[in-house]
Image (spheres, rainbow, N blue to C red):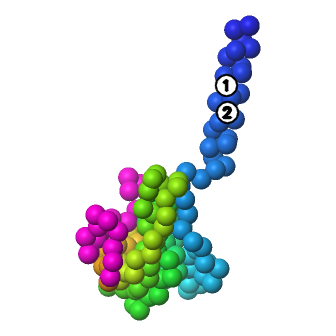
Amino acid sequence: MRGTVAGTAVTLAAAALLTAGMTTASASPPTTTASPTATTSPAATARGSRGDRVLVDCFAHRNVRPTDFILACGDGNSRLKGLQWSSWGTGGATGTGTNWVNDCKPYCAAGTFHPYPVVIRLSGDTQWKKHPSFDRFTQLTLTYTGARPEGFQRVMSYPLWDGPSSPQG
């Protein structure tokens, strides 16, 4: 009897973990079909020379001039969409887009995403641990040009991650 109870408990726990892995923990912002999640230029993929600057995403993929970018890797409750870059290079990158932020009211899974126009600035560089032939941006700064999420400053800066195994990822 004891083995049956333990076996049932293990089976139920495994089923719960499998179910949790197949469902989302939070609401998602509206999706657009006009642009892919992220884009990488063929030149950046092929070159791999020092001096190339990439933006590393939550999945440890290198991105050059992405059209979308998730800021909150853990829960997806803050993301940049519709990004348009006016500059991208060794001195940094500048662009505009929309920061979609979940208000998490009454809780995140039932929250509503709200759009906030922003100017984006990428700066800093360091060698990317996963692909040492690339340098990655280390800092992302958002400047809200109009309304901004509750509790946010007009200018917000975030350290960028090296990939899922890094402290920020």
Q: Where is residue 19 in the image (x, y as percent from the top left)?
A: 67, 42
The three-letter amino acid code for the residue at tag 1 is: Val
- Circles 2 and 1, Cβ within 8 Å, touching? The answer is yes
Crowd band around label 1 with a 10 angstrom C-alpha radius: few (<14), some (14–19), many (20+): few
Type of amino acid under label 2 = Ala
Please name the predominant secondary structure of the magenta segment in the image.
loop
Residue linked to disc 2: 14
| Residue 29, position as x, y percentages in the image | 54, 68
Within the magenta stretch, is there residue 73?
no
- Magenta-colored span: 146-169
Foreground residue among 109 and 99: 109
Give the quarter of the figure containing the N terminus: top right
Image location of residue 63, percent across then percent down: 51, 75
Q: In which quarter of the image is residue 120?
A: bottom left
The secondary element bearing badge 2 is classed as helix
Q: Can you say which quadrant of the picture contains the C terminus?
A: bottom left
Q: Residue at x 72, y 12 (%)?
A: 3
